[in-house]
Amino acid sequence: MDEQGREAFRAYVAARSPALLRTAYLLTGSRVDAEDLLQTALAKTYLAWDRIRDREALDGYVRRVMVNTQTSWWRRRRVDEYATDDLPEPGAGHDATDALVLHDALWTALGELPTRQRAMVVLRYYEDLSEAEAAQVMGVSVGTVKSTTSRALAKLRDTSGLRDDPRTALPYDGVTA
Amino acid sequence: MTPLDDELRSLLHSRADRVSPAADPLGGIERRANRMRRNRVAASVAGAALAVAAVAVAVPALLPGRGGGASSVAATPTPSTPASPAAPGGYGPNELDPAHPWAYRGDQAVLANGNLDTLRRDWDVKHPGAVLTPLYGQVYEPSKRPEIVFVSHSPGADRWGMSTTSESGTVFLVDQPFPSDSSVLMAALSGDEVPRLVIVAGPATGDMSYAVDGVSFHTIVGPVPGVGFAPLQGDTSQDAVRVLDGNGDLDHPVFLGPAPDAAPPSTASPAPGAKPVNYLEWQTRGTVDARTESQAVTAFAKAKGTTYDQVGHHVLWGGTDKSGRNLVFMEAWTAGGTAQTFGFVSTGEPFLGPVIGKSPDVLAYLASGAPGTGTDVLVLLPRLGAGPFSYATSATAPYREVGNARSDLGNVAVIDRDPKATSDRLKVLDGDGMKVLYDGAVQPLLCGASGCG
């Protein structure tokens, strides 16, 4: 990479790393892991910088590297996503305290999602990507985005004990664009 | 927009907003990038240097008149370096960039008739989102089946592989991470006759040779430039591969290093293809398509925290439920492990079942029901040779016969089960309908590694 490319990369990191770190945090659920994930993703981007022709699509490229890297780490760390002996207690009321309880339960449930489902939720509900954009980042079809998101939402309702909460009532396939 | 959408957005933004920017992210990134680059080049050089060291020790033992004939060439003890060291962030002329791979070399007919589309679809099941590009294809004469070598690009997760076909669909002979030395792809294949080594290098490379003793290199005459196959026979513990550039520069080979092992060393874990001690020799019942089977194996690998190629499996039953969802019930294991039951449904959570006991009379698998059905799906699979089997919805409900395993291979019971059922029962009789093989609760049959279904 020449000096001009290095400067462009530095400018990109300075402008985008705070936002990308937030996404990394939502993907990992841990500040430390998020920094590690983002640094790895940006280091890979740095090495590939000269080959990335469409600089407008950089965010998408970095997001994709983060999702793939996170999936790869998840496999190596041998996390068993199916072992869920202790479920959080569901929130029952509708006041401010219960809203916090609801958020805590949702956050816990989010952490128990399989990596790709979690990534899909982050891309769709935090990054506000359309189904087509999320499909591009994840490298899957739009249909897979719909089904993965649907499964993630269903699991969030089930594992967070929110199935009966009127605030989260939703048809099983009620994924909105 | 739904309430859950709103709650999720609110939650994600509030949690993300708590994250403050990292201090000096740039310094850490550049340090890590440089480390990655160094590791990559070091791995490349180390592999070659290791082989050269072995060569340097062996060369004094070579006396004139001994060793290879006209086509053998004693390797030079000159330290090997890559002909074209990777430029920072780039690839040399004889290196493979997974994002911009070499052009396809080989039989175009192998890719035709939807073969490439099928391969890409099946690969996508194993590695979602990866972009597969074929590098070489041929029909392997002994088996008369097509073989395709390919590279797979996915940011941060590049791989390469080799596929063939069988009656049940695509079979991946090789599925490996992209090597740190991207000048050559190599793997040992079991082969239909003898084990063989496949080597794929750049199209502009020259002489490709193999030395079973790591010293006496014999040229491999490949089907096309940069592609070669070598039989693996005898003691291959010292074997080596060398690829020269188009000018035949012996001092700076494109690649010089050990060949991959033809068989795992004795200390390695048994291959997943080896049957575990508790392997159940039950004939496959029903039907299962290759895609669903592959998805099931992928799900099992994920549940066990391993990779697809480290999983062995045997389908016990495949079929559909009333909602048309594909169900697969199989025994599966990881290399060196014991077989356990595993259930997979095309839209739902996988079922990680118990370790298979000695000569079970019946196996069971519970799948979450299709959306809107309000019931789960219970699959009951008595052993072959068993007779009538019956199901009762509770401890006090009467039994009703749901199948007879004796005469019909496909006669497996698929039952709509109340999700709250805890005391439902199952009775299985022997082939004569006289002796009770199992009479008890369903629940113990469902207890697996993650608890009871």
Image: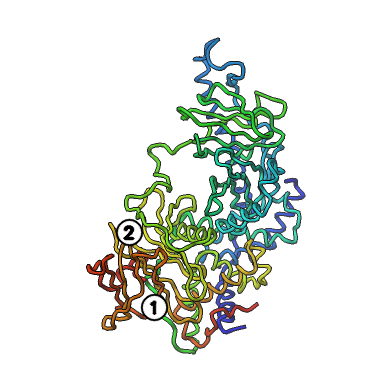
Q: Residue A136: which quarter of the image? A: bottom right
Whether residue B148 is visible, yes or no, is: yes
What residue is shown at x 68% (from left), y 25% (from top)? B249
Left or right of B365? Residue A170 is: right
- Residue B90 shows which numbered tag? none
What residue is shown at x 50% (from left), y 82% (from top)? B372
For the residue carrying disc 1, how many other residues have a C-alpha within 10 Å: few (<14), some (14-19), or many (20+)?
A: some
Q: Nearer the viewer, residue B27 or B236?
A: B236
In the image, residue A49 lies at what x, y percent?
70, 51
Q: Nearer the viewer, residue A143 or A3?
A: A143
Left or right of B430? Residue A16 is: right
Q: Amino acid at mark 1?
A: Arg
For the residue carrying disc 2, how many other residues have a C-alpha within 10 Å: few (<14), some (14-19), or many (20+)?
A: some
Residue at the left extreme, as displayed = B435
Left or right of A69? Residue A108 is: left
Q: Does label 1 or label 2 sit earlier along the sequence? A: 2
- Residue B356 shows which numbered tag? 2
In the image, residue A155 lies at what x, y percent?
49, 74
Residue at mark 1: chain: B
Q: Residue A53: which quarter of the image? A: bottom right
Location of mark 1 (residue): B417
Whether residue B34 is visible, yes or no, is: no
In the image, residue B398 lies at what x, y percent?
28, 82
Residue at mark 2: chain: B
Q: Nearer the viewer, residue A168 or B233?
A: B233
- In the displayed structure, would residue B11 be above or below residue B70? below
Dot 1 falls on a residue whose secondary structure is strand
Q: Amino acid at mark 2?
A: Ile
In the image, residue B19 lies at what x, y percent?
57, 68
- In the displayed structure, would residue B270 be above or below residue B384? above
